[in-house]
Image (cartoon, grey):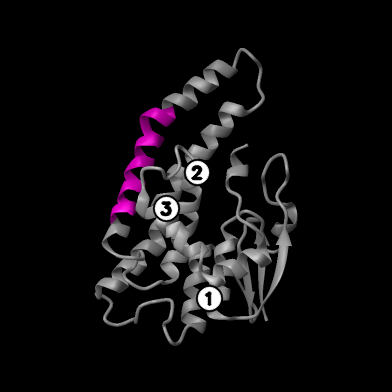
Amino acid sequence: MIKVHHLDHSRSQRVLWMLEELGLPYELVSYQRDAKTWLAPKALRDVHPLGKSPVLEDEGLVLAESGAILEYLVDRYDSERRLSPELMPPQAPERLRYRYWLHYAEGSAMPPLLMALVFARVRKAPMPFFIKPVARMIADKTMQGFVSPQLKLHLGWMDAELGRSRWFAGERFTAADIQMSFPVQAAATRSGGLDNYPQLRAFLARITERPAYQRAEARGGPLNLAASGR
């Protein structure tokens, strides 16, 4: 049976959701973040040298990286292509959009969101009183000069693209939407939220209504990304 090493409030929620969409049975091994540092426990290093989640085990394979895991599950178990476009022709618009969003999620969307999280924590971090104003000034200037404009650029782009079609790859739901769910959910809790992005808000409403998403949440626990910025 497939085994998923799942860290609470993390990207591994997407793997559980994917397995539920495919109707595949799986064993769930859960790990809890440190309440103070929000880091993964050292026990995950026994599973993978980087100590990160998700990690999936299947028939002797040990796979990491959520995007790579989703692609593996599609290729291995989705023979009917319910969650991905046909492989041929490779230049088909849906196929190109599907591949783009699978890689965009972590390659382009997440870096500014991660930076927003880091600088938010810098502002709140305990430090000597004479250093705190300097640290906050650096954090604020970086956010205003680079991170916030990048977030606005990317969120505007995603919102506009969802105005073209119901889902990221086209008119039907695919694994690309599962992969894109995490950056959109992260954006909803950081740097102003999604008040100005109606298509992204509608996307979040649609995915949380899916029975497979709800089953994944019931097994892995609710995704609370706001807590990571405490």
Does 51 lie within the magenta span? no
- Residue 221 figure quarter: bottom right
- Residue 103 figure quarter: bottom left
Mark 1 / mark 2, whichever is N-terminal = 1
In the drawing, does residue 176 fall left or right of residue 228?
left
Residue furthest top in the image: 130
Determine which residue is flagged by label 1: 21
Residue 75's place in the image compared with 219, above or below, is: below
Residue 36 seen in the current view: yes
- Residue 220 figure quarter: bottom right
Residue 160's place in the image compared with 93, above or below, is: above
Mark 3 / mark 1, whichever is N-terminal = 1
Residue 105's place in the image compared with 154, above or below, is: below
Point out the stretch of residues depicted in magenta: 142-160
Is label 1 in a helix, a strand or a loop?
helix
Label at residue 201: 3
The residue drawn where x is 42% and y is 24% is: 141
Label at residue 213: none
Q: Main secondary structure of the magenta part?
A: helix
Residue 93's place in the image compared with 156, above or below, is: below
Determine which residue is flagged by label 2: 114
Task: Give the amino acid at mark 3.
Answer: Arg
